[in-house]
Amino acid sequence: MGFITTTIYLYFLRNYSLPSSVKDLFSSTMQISSILIGFLITTLSILLSIEDKKIIQHLERLGSYNKLINYFIDATKWSFCLVTASSVGLLINFNIQQSWHYLAFATWLFVLTTTVSSCYRAFDIFASIIRS
C-alpha cells in the first residue's frame, strides 16, 4: 500500500506545492503515532497474557501465533519510523520551495501509508481474537 500510494503521488501530484499547514500535519501525525505506539505495546502485552484462551492455543498449533506477534512488532516499528519521519518533516521549511521537497513528502507518505496498513492488519486480527 505504501508503494502504491507513493507511486500515485509521484506520478500525479508531485508538481503541486504543499500547503503551508503541512507542518501541522506532521505535528499531528507525530502525536497520533506516539499514542499508537503505546496502544500497540499495550495490545501486545494483552495478547501475550491471554495464552490460556482456546483461540491462542489454536493459533500456536497452527504456527500463526508468532506471526501475529511479529505483526504487532512490525506495526510498532513502522510507528516509530513515522514519528521519526514526521519529526524530520517538522525541521524542513516547506514554505521555500526546493526541488527535493516532493521526494521528502513522498518518503513521509510511504511511511505513513505503510504504518496505517501494518496497524490495520494487526488490529484486525486482534479484533477477531477478542471477538472469539
Image (tube, grey):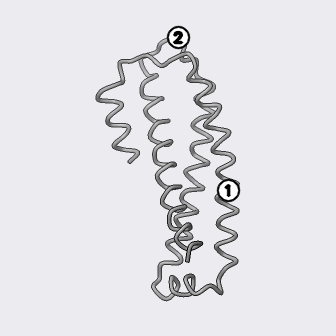
What secondary structure is marked by label 1? helix
- Residue 22: x and y in percent read 56, 23
Q: Earlier in the sequence, mark 1 or mark 2?
A: 1
Q: Residue furthest left?
A: 11
Image mark for residue 96 = 2
Q: Is residue 82 left or right of residue 6?
A: right
Label 1 vs label 2: CA separation? 37 Å
Residue at 55% x, 83% y is 55
Q: Amino acid at mark 1?
A: Phe
Give the percent coordinates (x, y) of residue 66.
Answer: 53, 76
Q: Dot 1: within a 10 Å radius of its alpha carbon, few (fewer than 14), some, or many (20 or more) residues?
A: few
Q: Is residue 35 left or right of residue 70?
A: right
- The crowd level at tag 2 (other Cα within 10 Å; few <14, some 14-19, many 20+) is few
Height in image: 101 above or below 95?
A: below
Where 55 falls versus 17 (above or below)? below
Total marks shown come to 2
Q: What's the amino acid at mark 2? A: Ile
Picture disc at residue 78: none
Comparing 72 with 39, the one in front is 39
Q: Residue 3 at x, y = what percent?
A: 36, 44
Badge 2 element? loop
The residue drawn where x is 61% and y is 37% is 29
Q: x, y percentage for residue 37?
A: 66, 52
- In the image, taking residue 45 as reference, residue 123 lies left or right, namely left
Name the image quarter holding residue 84.
Answer: top right
Work out whether 125 lies above or below 2.
below
